[in-house]
Image (cartoon, helix red, strand yellow):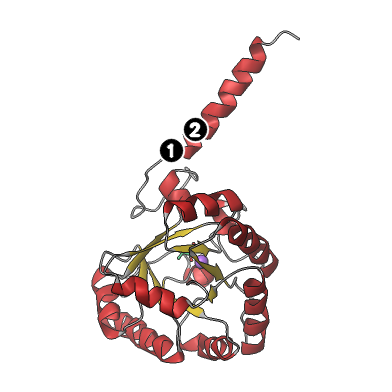
Amino acid sequence: SPTRPDHYLAALQQSGNVISALTAYDYPTARLLDEAGIDILLVGDSLGMVVLGYQDTVDVTLNDMVRHTGAVARGSKRALIVSDLPAGSYDDAGTAVASGRELMDAGAHCVKLEGGEEVAPQIEALIAAGIPVVGHLGMLPQHVREEGGYKKKGLTEDEAQRIINDAKLLEQLGVCAIVLESVKGNTAGRVREAITIPTIGIGSGEDCDGQIRVTHDLTGMFPWFRPAFAEQYADIATDISKSATNYIDALAKMRP
Ligand code: KIV
Ligand code: NA
């Protein structure tokens, strides 16, 4: 059951199917995705862009994440709910635990935070406090401003080694899965070989135990930007626009 994320993920991994994960930020989306059979719902801080209209994830607050985690938890019966610790909510071990508790109290089954060795004390403290953790390596969107853009990771051998070493460290610390974002496919495959916990990729090729996408990309709900790797299976933006113009046209024909 999702209350034991490590067992839940191990069972999925052993089933031989690719683990399916999508983001959700609200009740109806969580309920629809959960009922469709998704394995993992991520309350991602991508919320900042696709729901709140910010340029990046950096301004998302812990209160934002708590509110949206609650909505997703109310809509979900079956899936594992992973909630992002937003930027600034895990600057040290004590802060990480206090923030993690808030997300767990809101209904998360585990929390995700970005980084490797540099956040080891925070990961250790969370796990010691009984808060299960998912790691996140490769492109770290909470650092996009220092990075000066979204960049592919693990292209050089040095960078590949650092990601592999961080993945091994995270596994030793006891994280239950690792998201690999924008990691060169071959490097993602090497990470998968190096650890036993599942890797969940986005923009990192097919050699991962699971795949995660931003639901708004999949459904065409955020038409102003869609990454090249994201499949699009619907065109919700067009349906919303059409609904509005049909309504406006219908009102124009009313003669009260
Ligand atoms: O916030 C998010 O949507 C994420 C995924 C891209 C993994 O962290
Ligand atoms: Na995120």
Residue 250: image quadrant is top right
Crowding at mark 1 (Cα within 10 Å: few <14, some 14-19, many 20+): some
Q: What element carries label 1?
A: loop
Seen at 59% across and 66% down, the residue is 58
Q: Position of residue 242 (x, y in %)?
A: 52, 27
Horizontal relation, residue 104 to residue 123: left or right:
right
Viewer-proximal residue, 96 or 8?
Answer: 8
Q: Where is residue 73 in the image (x, y as percent from the top left)?
A: 60, 62
Q: Mark 1 points at which residue?
A: 235
Pointer 2 with pointer 1, Cβ within 8 A: yes
Q: Where is residue 83 in the image (x, y as percent from the top left)?
A: 56, 69
**The residue under label 2 is which amino acid type?**
Asp
Direction top: furthest residue:
255
Asked if residue 155 can be seen in this view, the reply is: no
Viewer-proximal residue, 213 or 227?
Answer: 213
**The residue under label 1 is which amino acid type?**
Asp
Q: Is residue 23 above or below residue 13?
A: above
Seen at 47% across and 76% down, the residue is 5
Horizontal relation, residue 254 to residue 236: left or right:
right
Q: Which numbered tag is attached to residue 239? A: 2
Residue 45: image quadrant is bottom right
Viewer-proximal residue, 95 or 138?
Answer: 95
